[in-house]
Every structure is written in structure tokens, then in C-alpha cells.
């Protein structure tokens, strides 16, 4: 980090800033330029409150020279992180495919879908039990009963289960019953929830917020890791742009960007990105081609009557066809 002093900063002010940084354990090199003094600050500058330094007398500005996240940063962890989710690896050479309905609706619905997804080659079963709906009048999910139905489907198929958590008070329950805890887009910056999830070792699927930058997203991952849980998988699910043709705009560039910036696995959810079933296949294939570690796809046995997100749900048959294309693409990509 670099601290640029004002051109009329006094020697006392320079020494005051230097002393403050040294008290925090930093090494400070004072460079007296022609125009102004510039302080080069070395050490674990992640812990320095840069706003506070920028407000000190004589300071012109503080310039960070590295990303504000450390534990999620590839610089400090060059190898890819591979995460064990219920016995299946995410982030290694194999593509992780998570599929299932937007919402768990009934035992029959979930069991039927789970069996066909398993037969098509998906490794993980998803299904929302606690649903973050825009309208309070929309179906809110089956709650704990939904998690029990997911557990039952897991006992039949052996597929690890993925479901969304909405509040810190449920962390213990999810830790006990769920293989991969999803933090939805709307909760990406629910910092209390992130800290609480950091207290567990249960893998977390952290979706990108509706209007969040890649850096903000990685800072949210940092919250979970800094609190003690290194098992974080990122999920790009489309961001808000001016475009209204699709529900969101899939930011595929996030895949190579995250691969450069971080060691964490990244998967892509084309269903919430597009909001339309007809685009799920091309976007899934594009995600695989872009280097994603996995995809998460919504599948419903009867999309027209789904209690949530029917327009973007693939039928089990369409999902099977997608899986065949994904496999063919993987062969081509080697
Ligand atoms: C979901 O996966 O069911 C969901 C609500 O997604 P998002 O948080 O990305 O909108
Ligand atoms: Mn959904």
C-alpha cells in the first residue's frame, strides 16, 4: 500500500502517519519526492484501516497495490482449491453438475426428478426449501420439511444435496443436514450469515449478488474463509444490466476472471441468468467451454405447473440431452 502525502504536509504529519503504521506492525519507507512525500507500506496491509489513514492530517490519498482479499486470493494460494462435497470433488478435473427443481414441492416431485437426474449423470441434487421470493405472496418453500424431503431423495439416489439458507439462525440445522449450503444472490452480503457459516466446515456455494462486482463477491468469500471455513465454491448466476430480454445477463467473463484472481472453484447457473429454458443449454455449454468447474441447472418434471421459476426449468428429458452435449464438449476440450 502507498500513502501519498499532501505537498504541504509537515514533517510531523509524515512522522505521525509513519508511527501509526509502524504501531500496526508495518514497515514504512519514507520517500521525499520533489512534489510530496510518498510512504511505501510493507506488511500485512489487509489489516490496516485505509479510510482512517486517508483521514489523517497531511494525507492526500491511500493507494492499495493489491486486492483487498487475501485468503481467497490466488497470489497466496497458487493451486486450485478442490472441495469435497459429500464425497464428490468440486474444483478438480471433473465437471460438477448440480441439478434439481427451483423449489422442493412434494416427496413425489423430488423423488421422481432426483431419480432421472441421477440416471442422466448429475452428481448433486438441488432444491429450495427456504425460498427468497420477491413477493411475500409467492410460494415461500416448505422450510424444514423441504430439507427432510431432500435428505430422503439423497438416501434413494446417493446424491449430495444443495439448498439455500436465508438466515444465521438456520446454520446449525443446515450444517447437520445439508451437504452444500447455498447462499443466494440476495444474501451475498449478509455478513452475519457469512460469518456464521465461517464457523462451520460445511461447504458453501456462494452466489454472486444481483449487482455485485467480482471484487465484492470475493470479499464475501473472504468473510467465510476469514471466519474459519475454507470450503467456498463461487457461483456466477447473472447480473443486472440494462438488458431486459433475459432475466439477468450471464457474466461469463467472471469465470476466467475468478480463475485468475482466486483459487476457489467457480460454477455457473445459466437458469437464473437467462430466466428462460431455451437458453439454458447454450449457456451451459458456453460455461463449460469458458472453464467453469461446474454448472447448476433447474429441472422440473412439469415446468408449466412449477411453484417457482417454471419458465427457466428444463424437463428431465431436455436435461438428459444437455448432459449428452456436455459430455461431448468435454471430450472435445480434453
Ligand atoms: C436459487 O438458486 O434458487 C436462487 C434463488 O438463485 P439466486 O439466489 O441466484 O437468485
Ligand atoms: Mn429458482
Image: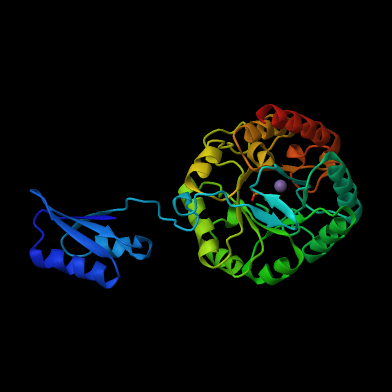
- Please state the horizontal and vertical placement of residue 279, each as a whole percent of the image: 69, 31
**Can residue 127 be seen at all in this image of the molecule?**
yes
**Can residue 132 be seen at all in this image of the molecule?**
no
- Please state the horizontal and vertical placement of residue 90, each as a whole percent of the image: 67, 49
The residue at the point 75 percent across, 28 percent down is: 328
- Please state the horizontal and vertical placement of residue 222, each as a whole percent of the image: 50, 59
- Please state the horizontal and vertical placement of residue 270, each as a whole percent of the image: 67, 38
Quick check: 210 left or right of 316?
A: left
Residue lying furthest top: 332
Q: Quadrant of the N terminus?
A: bottom left
Residue 121, quarter of picture: top right
In the image, residue 44 sits, relative to residue 309, either above or below, namely below
The residue at the point 32 percent across, 50 percent down is: 65
Q: Quadrant of the C terminus?
A: top right
Please state the total of marks drawn on the protein image.
0
In the image, residue 292 sits, relative to residue 111, either above or below, namely above
Quick check: 107 left or right of 289?
A: right
The residue at the point 78 percent across, 35 percent down is: 323
Q: Nearer the viewer, residue 330 or 311?
A: 330
Quick check: 242 left or right of 98?
A: left
Q: Nearer the viewer, residue 157 or 83?
A: 83
In the image, residue 308 sits, relative to residue 222, either above or below, namely above
Residue 61, quarter of picture: bottom left
The residue at the point 62 percent across, 43 percent down is: 237
User: How is the structure coloured here?
Assistant: rainbow
Residue 5, quarter of picture: bottom left
Amino acid at each position: 500500500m502507498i500513502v501519498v502525502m499532501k505537498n504541504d504536509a509537515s514533517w510531523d504529519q509524515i512522522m505521525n502517519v509513519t508511527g501509526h503504521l509502524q504501531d500496526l506492525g508495518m514497515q514504512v519507507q519514507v520517500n521525499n519526492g520533489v512534489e510530496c512525500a510518498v510512504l511505501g507500506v510493507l506488511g500485512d496491509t489487509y489489516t490496516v484501516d485505509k479510510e482512517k489513514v486517508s483521514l489523517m492530517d497531511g494525507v492526500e490519498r491511500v493507494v492499495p497495490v493489491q486486492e483487498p482479499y487475501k485468503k481467497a486470493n490466488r497470489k497466496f494460494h497458487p493451486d486450485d482449491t478442490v472441495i469435497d462435497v459429500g464425497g464428490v470433488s468440486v474444483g478438480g478435473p471433473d465437471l460438477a453438475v448440480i441439478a434439481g427443481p427451483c423449489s422442493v414441492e412434494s416427496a413425489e416431485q423430488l423423488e421422481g426428478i432426483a431419480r432421472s437426474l441421477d440416471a442422466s449423470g448429475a452428481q448433486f441434487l438441488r432444491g429450495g426449501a427456504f425460498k427468497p421470493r420477491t413477493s411475500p405472496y409467492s410460494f415461500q418453500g416448505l422450510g424444514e420439511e423441504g430439507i427432510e424431503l431432500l435428505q430422503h431423495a439423497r438416501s434413494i439416489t446417493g446424491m449430495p444435496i444443495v439448498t439455500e439458507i436465508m438466515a444465521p439462525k438456520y446454520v446449525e440445522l443446515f450444517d447437520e443436514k445439508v451437504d452444500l449450503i447455498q447462499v443466494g444472490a440476495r444474501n451475498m452480503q449478509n455478513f452475519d450469515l457469512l460469518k456464521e457459516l465461517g464457523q462451520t466446515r460445511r461447504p458453501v456455494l456462494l452466489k454472486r449478488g444481483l449487482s455485485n462486482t467480482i471484487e465484492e463477491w470475493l470479499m464475501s468469500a473472504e468473510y467465510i474463509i476469514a471466519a474459519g471455513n475454507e470450503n467456498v465454491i463461487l457461483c456466477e448466476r447473472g447480473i443486472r444490466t440494462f438488458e431486459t430480454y433475459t432475466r439477468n445477463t450471464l457474466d461469463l467473463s467472471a469465470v476466467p476472471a475468478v480463475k485468475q484472481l482466486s483459487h476457489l472453484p467457480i460454477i455457473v447457473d445459466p437458469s437464473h441468468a437467462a430466466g428462460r429454458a431455451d437458453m439454458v443449454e447454450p449457456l451451459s455449454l458456453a460455461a463449460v467451454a469458458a472453464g467453469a468447474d461446474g454448472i447448476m441447472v433447474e429441472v422440473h418434471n412439469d415446468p408449466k405447473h412449477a411453484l417457482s421459476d417454471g419458465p427457466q426449468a428444463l424437463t428431465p428429458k431436455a436435461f438428459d440431452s444437455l448432459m449428452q452435449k456436455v459430455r461431448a464438449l468435454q471430450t472435445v476440450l480434453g
